[in-house]
Image (spheres, grey):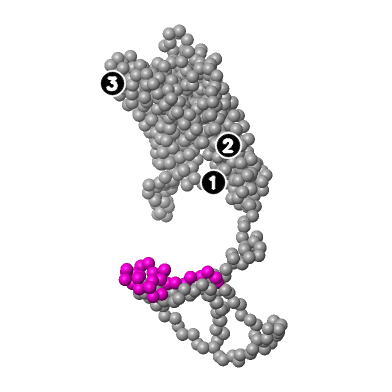
């Protein structure tokens, strides 16, 4: 003991190898994910409680309102809910997700991932992207599991299997987008575990162009669907107003109906696009609305958006006109699929357009699947567009139109340019007037300077030493070029139709000066000018 003390050997203060240091940044990311889930749930809870308080005939107490808010939060992630208190006693599934509700949890989760990836101070710990993604996802899914268990005792309980993959799907996509955005949206190399051929193929420019073209086609289809739905709502304005006013007579109920209709507008846009593509959308087990006709669906509930359905019977030229939407989408895909480089072949352009059609079809497939879902167990078990028919129709329309349009646009952009080399005879002489080589530019500039007066100060030109005298040798026109002692003729440029009247160039002086400058020009107008080539001084 004395030897150890005398030698002054310090005791090791390092932690044991088996103990890992806890990171406060990782704990903050877990808390951030839980807070993101809590904010979304709290927003819906406040909204439901406000509507419950303002309702003159509440059906349940505050516990029922909170259970309803939990069910709506799960429905915003795409989870299928089940309603047990039906008149028939058969549980009725509710699986149609209002797409506008999905925006709330996605934005909150993305914001939590971005905040977890950023450091407010220079000395603050910054976790790797994978650690931030895992920590934020852990906190969010923990709250999701608790909400699923709590909603089981309410009027709308969640299907455990549906909640087990819908909530992680939304959370994973939103967290990945947040981490990617916080890292500067890098487009780095693909993981090394992928095959080499796949990694080399994906980095080609055609895939970025195909993604842009497919996204443009999908946006055109959605915009066309919104136009179709809006026009139908205006056309059936009286029925829509009557349905809205007849559902409830209090302002809180009408406000709730209005909010529900607003959250279903993105679904209606996808349904309108599916209707324009041809497959249409189902309104029950035996009713499908297409441009070719609508047999009718008598069992539909009264709702403002459902009043905009087409009239029963076969299609009319007005309903057939909606096929212009996929035509415009195909043209958009073909336009965006063309590269501006001239070395790209026609086959490469056609392949890019075809890949853009595939991207558009996949996008419409996912949107159609997300916008549809059951609203009951019998007649309303099928509600919305069929995902695979909508995707196939979107691919077929855009592929048929995009490939020839892309090839035509590519041919137009790579056409040979028309220049002086393509002209012949007097046209080539007229185009190549030698303006910058004949000295006319200096004469015009000197006239403009003299007419402007003091606006442009004179620039002092350093004196040029006089060249030594050179004996003048008379030029022999018959002498060959290059013979010593014989001077070749200098090039002469004749410019015709040139007007050097400086009175037309005075636009900044006073009225008296303008009149004097116009009446007494500095030089008489010149119709034809004989300009000799300037002689460069010999090097000293």
Against 343, residue 104 (above or below) is above
What span is colored magenta in the figure?
A: 495-521
Q: CA distance from mark 2 to mark 3?
A: 49 Å
Q: Residue furthest front?
A: 519
**Residue contact between numbered discs 1 and 3, judged by CB atoms under 8 Å:** no
**Which-is-in-front pick, marks 1 and 3?**
3
- The residue beneath circle 2 is 330
Please name whichever residue, 365 or 156, is drawn nearer the observer in this view of the structure.
365
Q: Position of residue 69 (x, y in %)?
A: 37, 23
* Lateral position of residue 142 relative to residue 61, left or right: right
Which quadrant would the C terminus be assigned to in this image? Answer: bottom right
Q: Secondary structure at mark 1?
A: loop
Q: Is residue 22 visible?
A: no
- The residue beneath circle 3 is 54
- The residue beneath circle 1 is 187
**Which-is-in-front pick, marks 2 and 3?**
2
Question: Which is nearer the N-term, disc 1 or disc 3?
Answer: 3
Q: Secondary structure at mark 2?
A: helix
Against 259, residue 196 (above or below) is below
The residue under the point 71% across, 84% down is 479
């Amino acid at each position: 003991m004395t030897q150890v003390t005398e030698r002054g050997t310090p005791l090791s203060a390092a932690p044991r190898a088996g103990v890992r240091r806890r990171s406060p940044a990782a704990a903050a990311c877990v808390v951030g994910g839980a807070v993101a889930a809590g904010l979304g749930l709290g927003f819906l809870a406040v909204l439901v409680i406000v509507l419950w308080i303002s309702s003159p005939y509440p059906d349940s107490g505050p516990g029922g309102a909170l259970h309803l808010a939990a069910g709506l939060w799960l429905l915003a992630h795409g989870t299928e809910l089940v309603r047990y208190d039906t008149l028939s006693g058969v549980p009725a599934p509710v699986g149609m997700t209002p797409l506008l509700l999905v925006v709330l949890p996605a934005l909150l989760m993305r914001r939590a991932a971005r905040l977890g990836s950023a450091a407010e101070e220079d000395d603050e710990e910054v976790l790797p992207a994978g650690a931030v993604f895992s920590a934020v996802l852990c906190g969010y899914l923990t709250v999701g599991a608790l909400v699923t268990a709590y909603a089981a005792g309410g009027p709308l309980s969640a299907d455990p299997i549906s909640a087990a993959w819908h909530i992680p799907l939304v959370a994973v996509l939103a967290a990945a987008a947040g981490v990617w955005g916080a890292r500067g949206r890098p487009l780095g190399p693909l993981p090394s575990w992928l095959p080499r051929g796949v990694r080399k193929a994906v980095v080609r420019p055609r895939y970025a162009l195909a993604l842009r073209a497919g996204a443009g086609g999908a946006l055109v289809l959605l915009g066309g669907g919104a136009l179709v739905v809006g026009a139908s709502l205006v056309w059936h304005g009286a029925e829509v107003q009557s349905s809205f006013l007849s559902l409830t007579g209090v302002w809180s109920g009408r406000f709730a109906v209005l909010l529900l209709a607003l959250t279903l507008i993105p679904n209606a846009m996808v349904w309108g696009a599916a209707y324009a593509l041809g497959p249409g959308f189902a309104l029950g087990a035996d009713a499908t609305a297409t441009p070719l006709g609508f047999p009718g669906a008598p069992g539909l509930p009264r709702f403002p958006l459902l009043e905009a359905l087409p009239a029963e019977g076969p299609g009319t030229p007005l309903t057939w006109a909606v096929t212009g939407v996929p035509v415009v989408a195909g043209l958009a895909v073909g336009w965006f699929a063309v590269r501006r480089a001239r070395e790209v072949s026609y086959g490469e352009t056609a392949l890019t357009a075809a890949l853009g059609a595939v991207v558009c079809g996949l996008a419409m497939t996912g949107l159609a699947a997300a916008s549809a879902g059951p609203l009951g167990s019998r007649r309303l078990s099928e509600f919305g567009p069929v995902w695979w028919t909508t995707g196939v129709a979107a691919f077929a329309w855009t592929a048929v139109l995009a490939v020839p349009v892309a090839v035509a646009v590519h041919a137009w952009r790579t056409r040979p340019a028309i220049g002086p080399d393509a002209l012949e005879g007097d046209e080539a002489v007229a185009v190549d007037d030698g303006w910058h080589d004949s000295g006319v530019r200096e004469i015009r500039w000197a006239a403009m300077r003299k007419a402007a007066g003091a606006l442009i100060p004179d620039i002092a030109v350093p004196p040029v030493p006089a060249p030594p005298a050179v004996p003048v040798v008379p030029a022999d026109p018959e002498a060959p070029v290059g013979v010593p002692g014989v001077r070749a003729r200098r090039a002469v440029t004749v410019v015709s139709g040139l007007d050097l009247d400086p009175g037309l160039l005075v636009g900044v002086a006073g009225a008296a000066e303008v009149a004097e400058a116009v009446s007494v020009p500095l030089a008489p107008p010149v119709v034809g000018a004989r300009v000799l080539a300037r002689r460069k001084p010999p090097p000293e």
